[in-house]
Image (tube, grey):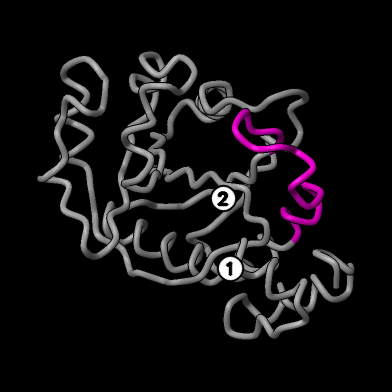
Amino acid sequence: MRIGLFGGSFNPVHVGHLVVAQDAAEAFGLDRVVFLPCGHPPHKPADALAPGEHRAAMIEAAIEGDPRFAISRCELERPGVTFTIDTVRALRAAQPDDSFHFLIGADTLPELHSWKDIGALLGLCEFLTLVRPGFDPARMDPVALGLPEPWPARLLARTARVHEVGVSSSDIRMRLAEGLAIRYLVPDCVERYISEHHLYGV
C-alpha cells in the first residue's frame, strides 16, 4: 500500500487540509493519506497547541467516512520532542510491506537539510512536494536545497499542484478569539467540537 504521511499541528484541522490531502492522494496515486498530528515539535512551543487529544478528535471527526484518510496518534503518544525520523522508523517497523511518502509544501523544501538525520530519512521514505498555483519548482535552484546529490533533482521531480485554499489554522483561531464565525472554514463537526469543548477561547 502506498501511504502518504501528512504531518502538521492541525490546530485545528480545516477544509484546506482536507482539500490538500485529497489532491495529494489523487496526484501521487496514494492508497491512503495518514494525518500525523504533532506532539512536541522542535520548532513550535508546545503551549501554543490545543491538547493533542482534542486535535486528534477533530481530525477523526473531519475524516470520518472517507476510506482514503486515516490518523496516526504515534507522535502524540511519544514523550519528548517529536522528530520525523523517529515517526517514519516506527511506522516502517509496524508496516514493513507498505511504502511511505511524506507530504510537504514547497516552502519546506529549502528547510529539509536542517531536519534531524535527513540523510537517513530521505532513504526511508519518499518526499512528495505539494505546489500551490504560482510556484514553479523548475525555477528553484537545486543548490539552494543544501542537500547532496541525487536528492535535489529527485525532490524537485516529485511535485504536484494542489488547490490554493486561503484558510489557515492561525486565522481560524484569531476569528474565534474575536467572536467571528468560522462556518465554511472548517467542517461542521469540527466547529461543533470546538464549541462543545470550549477550545481557542470559545
Q: Is residue 81 left or right of residue 29?
A: right
Looking at the rendered structure, the kind of residue marked 2 is Phe
Please state the horizontal and vertical placement of residue 102, each as a whole percent of the image. 41, 39
Task: Give the number of marks.
Answer: 2
Give the mark nearer the N terminus: 2 vs 1: 1
Say which quarter of the image contains residue 3. Answer: top left
Q: Residue at x 28, y 55 (%)?
A: 131
Decide whether residue 54 is among the magenta residues: yes
* Circle 1 residues within 10 Å: few <14, some 14–19, many ≥20: many
In terms of secondary structure, where does tag 2 sit? strand
**Mark number, residue 14:** 1
Looking at the rendered structure, the kind of residue marked 1 is His
Decide whether residue 51 is among the magenta residues: yes
Please state the horizontal and vertical placement of residue 94, each as a whole percent of the image. 58, 27
Please state the horizontal and vertical placement of residue 87, each as a whole percent of the image. 57, 28
Specify the quadrant that holds the C terminus: bottom right
Q: Which residues are magenta?
A: 39-57
Please state the horizontal and vertical placement of residue 148, each as a whole percent of the image. 22, 15
* Circle 2 residues within 10 Å: few <14, some 14–19, many ≥20: many
**Mark number, residue 35:** 2
Indicate whether 173 appears above or below 48.
below
Q: CA distance from mark 2 to mark 1?
A: 12 Å
**Mark number, residue 179:** none
Indicate whether 152 appears above or below 23.
above
In terms of secondary structure, where does tag 1 sit? loop
Q: Residue at x 78, y 25 (%)?
A: 79
